[in-house]
Image: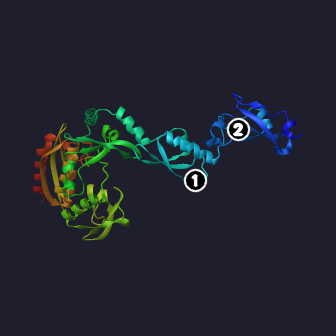
Amino acid sequence: MTHQQIDTFIGHKFGKDDQLCVIGWDGTRATRGYNKVYTVKCTKCAEDTELFADATFRMVKGNILRGSVPCGCAIQRNWEPWQYKVRATRAAKSLNFTILDYCEELVKSDTDVVVECETCKKVWTKRVASLLMGYGCLHCKNKAAGVVLTKPENVVITEFVESGAFVPGTTFSKTEPQLYGGRLRALWEVICPLCSSDEFVRAGLCSGVFVSDSHNLRSGKLPCRCSTKYRWTKEQREYQVRKVCERSQLYKFVGWLGGVYKNAYSRVVMQCSDHGEYSVGVSGFVAQGTRCPDCAKTGFNLRNAASVYILQAVGRYSFTGYGISREADRRLSEHSRNLKRVGFTIGQTQIYPMTGQQAWDLEKVIKAKFPLNPQDIPGFRTEATYYEHYQAVCDFVDKWLFENT
């Protein structure tokens, strides 16, 4: 008589719906020989031959008595690699994906899969677990959400303008959604009245069209050169450096330290006509007037010719500004650009040529004689007095030069 004929456990049913049935014992036992290992079959899983074949499983008798489920009816199950492939293929089809490749031979839940969306034809890399959890095409999802949630363009543009950060006359136009900063976003092209027709555009170093996303524009972050955080390109920085060299006639552009330009902290190698090569931060050289360290004395060369300049800054809170520079015209151009960004224009100006020592001394005398009217504007935090003192400052400088020359 066989084991199946005398084993009364054969035929035992279990599972939530009694879908599992013990169909035989092959004479083997589990560890230490205490528990028999039976073959069981699931009637539900037997309906899916692609995923479960004949739907038979081997189980220890003790696990059967405890109600364990070995098949796809279990809440959690350890799937075989070939079963993961079947499940991934089905999930991809339901999400409108086509699987192009598996990144591992033995497929598991964390295996990367290359899929193509049948709708937008974009190719993605997803994990098998992501497909099984129903995560579909991000591009299609965001595009669909954008159609539903996007505000009318005129409303969004009004929000940009209300930030108060943009120059009057700035125009905005929306583009198609693109990947920007690692996310799919609707981008905006910005035309600035100042930056879209400036010298960089005329020199062919910029298209004049600046691109940003709605979040940054709504919060007032300027994408153009009006921003103090504008990311200058290498070509634009070299243009600025060479322009300074042309004005001064004292320096020659050699190249970038290490041959690399990255950002405002990159150092440029210059050739001084008196002292040879030296390196300086490009931002300092272009915007702050930093020059050859051997020529300088506390940031200003007292031996060379210089000028004292006086200007009227006209705006909501007008003031009189002054300063010293070896290149007064360039310095006034920088002031004009910086003042325009904060709503000021330059009215009258006066430039007084003199020696570097005289300019150095005269600026100190002006600060001592006229009341300070500090401005939160670069160049005028300590070199500013009240607007109505403009003529008095000019008269004082004329008199001082007459007495000290």
Q: Which is nearer the eye, 247 or 204? A: 204
Disc 2 residue type (three-letter): Pro
Say above or below: 200 vs 171.
Answer: below
Single out the residue that lies furthest toward the top.
17
Q: Is residue 115 left or right of residue 149?
A: right
Disc 1 residue type (three-letter): Glu
Q: Secondary structure at mark 1?
A: loop
Q: Are marks 1 and 2 in contact (CB under 8 Å)?
A: no
Single out the residue that lies furthest toward the front.
1
Q: Splitting the image into 4 quarters, where does residue 144 fall?
A: top left
Q: Quadrant of the N terminus?
A: top right
Q: Which residue carries the number 1 mark?
A: 104
Q: Splitting the image into 4 quarters, where does residue 347 fall?
A: top left
Q: Position of residue 98 (x, y in %)?
A: 48, 46
Give the mark nearest the N terminus, 1 or 2.
2
Q: Which residue carries the number 2 mark?
A: 70
Say above or below: 207 vs 68.
Answer: below
Disc 2 residue crowd, few under 14, some 14–19, many 20+, Cα 10 Å: many
Q: Give residue 148's mark.
A: none
Q: CA distance from mark 1 to mark 2?
A: 26 Å
Task: Identify which residue is drawn at 57% across, 49% down.
Answer: 111
Q: Position of residue 315 (x, y in %)?
A: 17, 39
Q: Position of residue 3 (x, y in %)?
A: 86, 40
